[in-house]
Amino acid sequence: MPLYIMPCLCVKNKTWVNLTQLQIQKYLIKELLIPQNETGRAKNKLISRTDSRQSSVSMGIVGAAFLCGMFGLLFLSDVPYLILHIRATWTGRPDQRKALKKKEKKTFQKKKPKNASNK
């Protein structure tokens, strides 16, 4: 294999001595190769871009408020029952839980229609 004296184009004032052209190519490929996870394209896949348009900002706020409101209503509807259960646990009086269950049954009972024959 012939040995080449080849100037390096990427670094000024550097000459390759006593290396074959294949060795020089392998070295340059190894040094100039950019890992795929460090490219701008790969990094941009992981970053959300901001959109400063007023319409997109307002839609984001409305969407976030809607979701928070729905989950907030679900949570707030259970707060009275949660308070009663905590009080019953701390005081050691399970009668509050029984009263709560009776209250729930009364709330969900259907009214019976009056029959005309019962008059």
Image: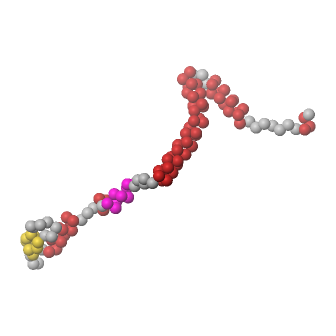
What is the magenta segment's predominant secondary structure?
A: helix
Q: Position of residue 80 (x, y in %)?
A: 60, 31
Residue 85 visible from this viewpoint: no
Residue lying at the far bottom of the rendered structure: 2
Q: Position of residue 76 (x, y in %)?
A: 57, 36
Q: Is residue 90 above or below residue 108?
A: above
The residue under the point 11% across, 72% down is: 7
Seen in the image, is 14 located left or right of residue 26?
A: left
Question: For residue 85, what is the image quadrant?
Answer: top right
Q: Position of residue 27 (x, y in %)?
A: 17, 67
- Give the magenta part as a residue range: 40-48
Residue 81 visible from this viewpoint: yes
The residue under the point 55% across, 46% down is: 66
Question: For the N terminus, which image quadrant?
Answer: bottom left
Question: For residue 6, what is the image quadrant?
Answer: bottom left
> Which residue is at the front of the view, 51 or 91?
51
The residue under the point 36% across, 58% down is: 44
Seen in the image, is 39 located left or right of residue 26?
A: right
Seen in the image, is 23 located left or right of residue 48?
A: left
Q: Is residue 70 above or below residue 32?
A: above
